[in-house]
Image (cartoon, grey):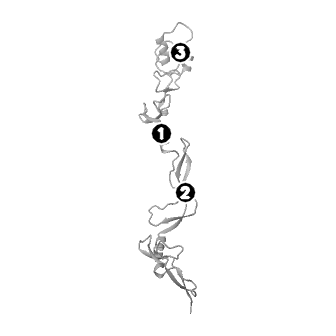
Amino acid sequence: MANWYTVECRHCRGELHVNEDWSDPPQYHKECAWYEEDCEICGQPMRIHRAWDNPPRVHKACREAKAAEWYERQCSHCRLPIKIHRSWGDPPEYHKDCAWFERSCEICGHSMRIHRGWDNPPSAHKECIAEKKAQWIERACKHCGDSMRIHKAWDTQPEYHKECAWYEVSCAICGRDLRIHRAWEKPPRSHKECFQRYAPTTGPPVSEPTKRGWKTGELSFHGVLRKRPGLLTRQAE
């Protein structure tokens, strides 16, 4: 006849009869060995044995169904797999630690975070761009009326576009082109070198009205009203 002995139940601490012929003697009473926990996925109860080293937290069927909701995609940066849930409307292309990198702002030089998924990554901080933009104003060109950008720091702010500021007339002496700026209050009628070359250097003093007539081309150097301004004759010399 087999020999029996008594051990202590590991749960209730009561007596537990064990036969010495049993290869795997119990450590709990039958009514003590099992307990119930709610599944973390479905919330329904599941039976857990107290002797299990790693008791489950979910039903096997729930775990398998949950696992089927996920799939893997290759990270566009490091090429390692990313876990993607099928319910995500915009699944990521990068790991969180791969998605962002740093670049220096072109205005202030400090670093800024850039996401690899952006089609048009910025070259400067938003506040730096706004501050730089605030340094410029717009004004209408006094000639064409179109807008032109002017920096507040400029000592001399233009009133015309570069292409609008200058125009050409014919020199009243030689007839060649003469560039005139629209901002000049008293634009010349002749080239400076033409006026200096053909102005008389001897003789009686010349009155100021006569000098103005030479400069504007309204008079010849003999004080006679010019019939064809811009065409110099040998007589004028």
Spatial CA span between label 2 and label 3:
87 Å
The answer to whether mark 2 and mark 3 are in CB contact below 8 A is no
Residue picked out by circle 2: 97
Amino acid at pointer 1: Glu
Nearer the observer, disc 2 or disc 3? 2
Q: Indicate the position of residue 54 as horizontal and vertical percent values.
A: 53, 73
Mark 1 residue crowding within 10 angstroms, few (<14) / some (14–19) / many (20+): few
Element carrying mark 2: helix
**Helix, strand or loop under label 1:** helix
Q: Amino acid at mark 2?
A: Asp
Of the numbered discs in the image, which one, if any, rests on residue 131?
A: 1
Query: Which residue in the rendered view is the most extreme toward the top?
Result: 204
Which quarter of the figure has residue 143? top left
Q: Report, in whole angstroms, how far the alpha carbon at label 2 lies from the one at label 1.
A: 31 Å
Q: Nearer the viewer, mark 3 or mark 1?
A: 1
In the foreground, 221 or 125:
125
Q: What is the secondary structure assignment of the residue under circle 3?
A: helix
Q: Which mark is residue 236?
A: 3
Q: What residue sits 49% from the left and 33% below the top?
A: 162
